[in-house]
Image (cartoon, rainbow, N blue to C red):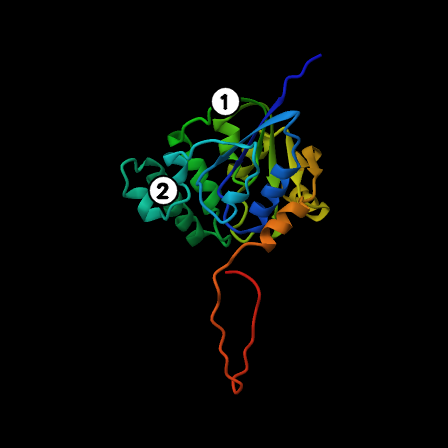
Amino acid sequence: MNNKKLKILIVSHGMQIGGVERSLIGLLESLDLQSCEVTLFLYEHRGEFMPMIPAGIRLLPESPSYFRLMQPLRSAIFCLNPLVGLARLTARIVTDIEKRFRTSTGFLLSRSHSYAQPFLPHIPGDYDLAISFLMPHDTVWKKVKAKKKAGWIHTDYTSVETGVHLPSEEPAWAAMDKIVAVSNEVAKSFAQVFPAQASKVEVIENLLSPSFVRKQSVIDYPPVDVIKDSETLVLCSAGRY
C-alpha cells in the first residue's frame, strides 16, 4: 500500500486583510494534511492573517528578492540588490510610454512580474502540484518544479481595471494544467478574454470555514473614539480602506 503524501505548493503574495487572503486561509484549512504535505510560499510575511495560517502548513522562509516585488518601488531600487527594483522601474517606464499611445490603461503588475523573473531565485522543492493563488502566475510558471500547475482567477477578466495584456499574460495561463475560477461568472469572463484556455477552466468557489469566522470574532481590535455629542449626527460605515 502506497502511503506517500501528495506534495502541494501554494504561492501567494502576502496575508493582508482581503478577499483573496481570506479565501487562501479557507483553502489551507480545508486540505487534508493526512494525505498531502502542503508548503506555502509568500512573497512577504506580513499581514493580519499571518497568525491564522493553520498548524501543519509548512511556511517557506521569506525571500528578499520576492519581497522586492511587494516593496514601494523606491525602496526596491535603493537596496543592496536593486535588480528586481530596476526591472519594476523598466516595466513602469514601458507601461507609461504605452499609455501615451494607446487607449488602454496599461498592464503594470503583469509586466513588472514578467520583467523581474530573471532576477528571482527558484522556489526550493519538487512538488506534485503547484498552485499560483494570485496572479500574475509567472513565478509558478518559471520558478517552480512541479508535475502539475494550476492558476487561480478571483476577478472578472472583462473588467480588470489595469487592463489585460494578452501577449504577456497568455503564456503563463497556457503553462497551467488547470485554471481555477472562483465562480461561474468569473469562468465565463476569463473564457471571453482567453478562449484558447477555456477548456482548462474549472470552478471552485471560495471556502470559508466556521473556525475562521470564530477566530475573527474574538480578535481584540483597538478601540475607536466615537463622538459622544447629542447635538452631532454620527454616521458609521463598516468597511476597510
Q: Earlier in the sequence, mark 2 or mark 1?
A: 2
Residue positioned 66% across, 25% down in the render: 35
Q: Residue furthest bottom?
A: 231
At horizontal 61% and vertical 37% (from top left) the residue drawn is 28
In the image, farthest residue toward the top: 1
| Amino acid found under the numbered disc labelled 2 | Thr
Rounded to the nearest whole Å, what is the CA distance between mark 2 and mark 1? 31 Å
Which residue carries the number 2 mark? 90
Can residue 209 be seen?
yes
- Residue 228: percent from left, percent from top: 50, 80
Per the image, label 2 sits on a secondary structure element best described as: helix
What residue type is disc 1 on?
Answer: Gly
Residue 44: x, y in percent? 44, 41
Judging from the image, what secondary structure is the residue with disc 1 in? loop
Looking at the image, which residue is at 43% across and 32% down? 61
- According to the picture, the residue beneath numbered tag 1 turns out to be 125
Q: How busy is the neighbourhood of tag 2: few (under 14 within 10 Å), some, or many (20 plus)? A: some
* Category of crowding for the residue at label 1, using alpha-carbon neighbours closer than 10 angstroms: few (below 14), some (14–19), many (at least 20): few
The foreground one among 232 and 93 is 232
Residue 156 seen by the camera? no
Q: Residue placed at 32% from the left, 36% from the top?
A: 83
Looking at the image, residue 219 sits to the left or right of residue 46; the answer is right
Q: Nearer the viewer, mark 2 or mark 1?
A: 1
Q: Number of callouts in the render? A: 2
- Determine which of the numbered discs, if any, sits on residue 13 in the image: none
Instruction: Give coordinates of residue 53: x percent, y percent.
Output: 55, 40
Viewport quadrant of the N terminus: top right
Q: Position of residue 129 (x, y in %)?
A: 60, 26
Front residue of this view, candidates 178 and 21: 21
Q: Quadrant of residue 218?
A: bottom right
Question: Between 229 and 82, which is closer to the camera in this rendering?
Answer: 229
